[in-house]
Image (cartoon, helix red, strand yellow):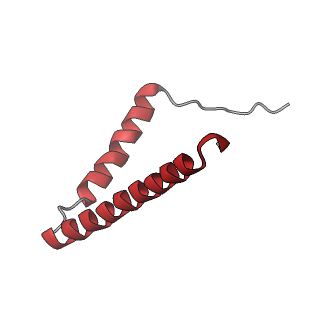
């Protein structure tokens, strides 16, 4: 009979691996330029406004049809 070697990493090895991966990502990060920041902020604002508009329209429809919903 074969025994499967099921190696379960300890908390210490999992945390160590997590920190190594996080360090790799951290080293690749860069501060966005002002142009990048403005474009990201504009896209985010449009998304928030779109969600607000959808919510407002749904609210008005529910008020219009009153007790049906």
Q: Residue at x 19, y 68 (%)?
A: 38
Examine the image and state in which quarter residue 67 appears: top right
Quadrant location of the C terminus in the rendered image: top right
Q: Position of residue 46 (x, y in %)?
A: 33, 65
Task: Specify whether 9 is left or right of 52.
Answer: right
Q: Identify the residue shown where x is 37% and y is 48%.
A: 21
Position of residue 2 in the picture relative to residue 23 (left or right): right
In the image, 32 versus 57, the foreground residue is 57
* Circle count: 0
Q: Nearer the viewer, residue 7 or 53?
A: 53
Who is closer to the viewer here, 13 or 61? 61
Q: Position of residue 5 (x, y in %)?
A: 68, 33
Q: Nearer the viewer, residue 20 or 32?
A: 32
Q: Quadrant of the N terminus?
A: top right
Residue 28 vs 64, above or below: the answer is below
42 vs 19: above or below: below
Q: Specify the farthest residue to the right.
A: 1
Query: Is the residue 28 above or below the residue 21 in the image?
Result: below
Image location of residue 10, percent across then percent down: 49, 26
Q: Residue at x 35, y 57 (%)?
A: 48
Residue 5 to residue 64: above or below: above
Residue shown at 32% from the left, 61% from the top: 44
Residue 54, horizontal then vertical, whole percent: 47, 57
Location of residue 68 by image quarter:
top right
Residue found at the far left of this picture: 34
Residue farthest to the top, as pictured: 11
């Amino acid at each position: 009979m074969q025994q499967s070697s099921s190696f379960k990493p300890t908390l210490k090895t999992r945390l160590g691996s997590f920190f190594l991966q996080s360090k790799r990502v951290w080293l690749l990060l860069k501060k966005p330029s002002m142009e990048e920041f403005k474009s990201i902020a504009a896209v985010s604002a449009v998304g928030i406004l779109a969600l607000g508009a959808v919510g407002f329209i749904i609210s008005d429809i529910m008020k219009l049809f009153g007790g049906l919903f």
